[in-house]
Image: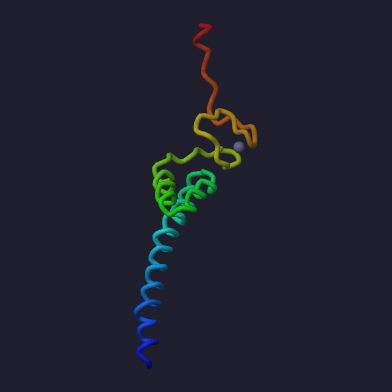
């Protein structure tokens, strides 16, 4: 092999490929993790659009990991906000109404 081709492959192309793969991994990994956590906890995967920038991806993924999971409706199993008393999807009560009987005793 000619010296020029050797220099081109091991001096330029190989480091370029290694650095590119490393950057993509450091960029894609938090986006992938953030999407998994968002799906599992019931948050919109659109939050990971912050991952268009690699630093935004790490920040969004860290926030996704620390957010508490949303609660699920016992009837239709869809995610609802933790403070909802009635499911907005199916109308089922998610908490019992307050007991007021002793008020009238
Ligand atoms: Zn429901």
Seen from the viewer's position, the closer of residues 65 and 102 is: 65
State which quadrant residue 63 falls in: top left
Outermost residue to the top:
105
Outermost residue to the front:
4
Residue plotted at (38% across, 87% down) = 4
| Left/right of residue 44 with respect to residue 60 in the rendered view | right
Classify 103 as above or below 42. above
> Which image quarter holds the N terminus?
bottom left
Seen from the viewer's position, the closer of residues 1 and 66 is: 1
**Percent x, y of residue 88:** 62, 33
**Percent x, y of residue 65:** 40, 46
- The quarter of the picture showing ligand 1: top right
Residue plotted at (51% across, 8% down) = 103
Classify 68 as above or below 85. below
**Percent x, y of residue 67:** 42, 40
Colouring used for the render: rainbow
Residue plotted at (37% across, 92% down) = 2
Seen from the viewer's position, the closer of residues 84 and 16 is: 16
**Percent x, y of residue 104:** 53, 7
| Left/right of residue 83 with respect to residue 23 in the rendered view | right
Q: How many marks?
A: 0
Seen from the viewer's position, the closer of residues 47 and 12 is: 12
Classify 56 as above or below 69. below
Outermost residue to the bottom:
1
């Amino acid at each position: 092999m000619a010296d020029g081709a050797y220099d081109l492959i091991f001096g330029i192309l190989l480091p370029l490929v290694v650095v590119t793969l490393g950057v993509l991994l450091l960029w894609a990994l938090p986006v992938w993790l953030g999407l998994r956590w968002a799906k599992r906890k019931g948050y919109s995967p659109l939050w990971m659009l912050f991952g268009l920038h690699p630093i935004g991806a790490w920040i969004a993924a860290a926030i996704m990991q620390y957010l508490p999971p949303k609660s699920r409706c016992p009837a239709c199993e869809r995610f609802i906000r933790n403070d909802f008393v009635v499911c907005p999807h199916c109308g089922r009560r998610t908490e019992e109404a307050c007991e007021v009987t002793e008020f009238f005793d």
